[in-house]
Image (cartoon, helix red, strand yellow):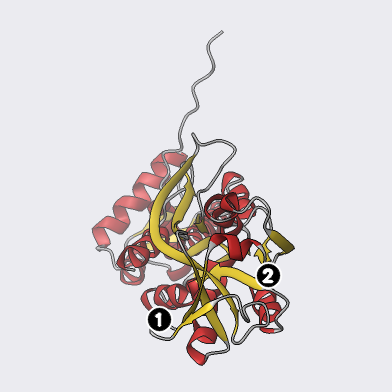
Amino acid sequence: MKKAMQTLPKITLKQLAVFVSIYQTGSTSRASEALHLSQSAVSSALTELESRLQMPLFERVGRRLNQHPNAHPIYVQAQAILGQSLTLEHYHKHQAGQIHIGASTTIGNYVLPPLLAELYKALPNANVNTYIANTQEVVAEVEQLNIDIALVEGMPRPADTKVIEQRAWRTDTLMVFAKRDSKWLTDMAAYNDVEHCYELSIEQLAKLPLLVREAGSGTRQIIDEQLLQHMPDAEVIMAIQQSEAIKHMVSADIGLGCLSQHVIEAELASGKLVQVKVAGIDLSRTWWLVWHKARHQSPIWQSFIDILTLE
């Protein structure tokens, strides 16, 4: 059995707007001025509407238009339709200026703020929502279409790679670091005055207490893959969800830490913390842009991509 074809309405919003304006102003000339249309265009739109409705809306007495009894109920319906269309238009404009940005913890806390400042500079009325969590949690939100675009550390590992787009964005380097004059490095590590860092072998580092991020974070992923795999007997004493907590604990000389250079650059500059270079270990990593292929790429989405591309 064939489905009945759905007929599309032939009445236009322009015809309704013309009718409402004539109804309110009382003439086609005043309606044409209000709508910035020619008087002939206004008269034509009214004639077309009456033809579509198959009923008169005004009685023409010379040059005057008197409201027909049909006019008022049509006016009420036309007002409602035009109001709904304006609501829809405003909703679209609101949505076009809205973006949900996800970021893993390091990026969200230390790199995202100046990027958002650039976005607001380009689009002062932008409506931005942010979600900051570890990489695994952020990617999960992208998969659920709750986030338009995400900036994450480490290699994203979505449950369904067919629906997720990922693009290399920037490179970053993790650093092993300690408190200046740490008790853990006394009589063990040589201090390099030229590069302002301690130097350790991988075997020496394995004997020291290490504070790291929790499983699921991009930082921990790199530590596992590029550091701890060389140290099967390493003394990892704590897995911590917040980078700030790791910094404070290292400052209290509880152990050594390993975080992004962005997290500790102020403390390195002030001399409160010091880098610990580990021979033969490369802790560089790639940061990624991640989005769902089905997500609409709005103008604000593209503006944010343009800002990221300039970085």
- Residue 157 visible, this angle: yes
Badge 1 marks a residue whose secondary structure is loop
**How many callouts does the rendering have?**
2
Q: Residue at x 39, y 58 (%)?
A: 169
Q: Give the farthest residue toward the bottom.
A: 270
Lower sequence index among marks 2 and 1: 1
Return the mark for residue 195.
1
Task: Tell me the quarter of the image containing the C terminus.
Answer: bottom left
Three-letter code for the amino acid on which mark 2 is drawn: Gln
Q: Nearer the viewer, mark 2 or mark 1?
A: 1
Give above or below for 101 relative to 117: above
What residue is pinned by disc 2? 242
Q: Are marks 2 and 1 in contact (CB under 8 Å)?
A: no
**Viewer-side residue, 141 vs 70:** 141
Give x and y (percent) for residue 286: 43, 56
Task: Tell me the quarter of the image containing the N terminus.
Answer: top right
**Viewer-side residue, 291 vs 46:** 291
Q: Quadrant of residue 80?
A: bottom right
Left or right position of 41 against 100:
left
Give above or below for 80 relative to 257: above
**Viewer-side residue, 306 vs 225:** 225
Give x and y (percent) for residue 266: 51, 85
Give x and y (percent) for residue 192: 44, 81
Left or right position of 267 against 38:
right
Q: Residue at x 60, y 75 (%)?
A: 188
Q: Residues within 10 Å of mark 1 (few under 14, many from 20)?
A: few
Badge 2 marks a residue whose secondary structure is loop
- Residue 131 visible, this angle: no
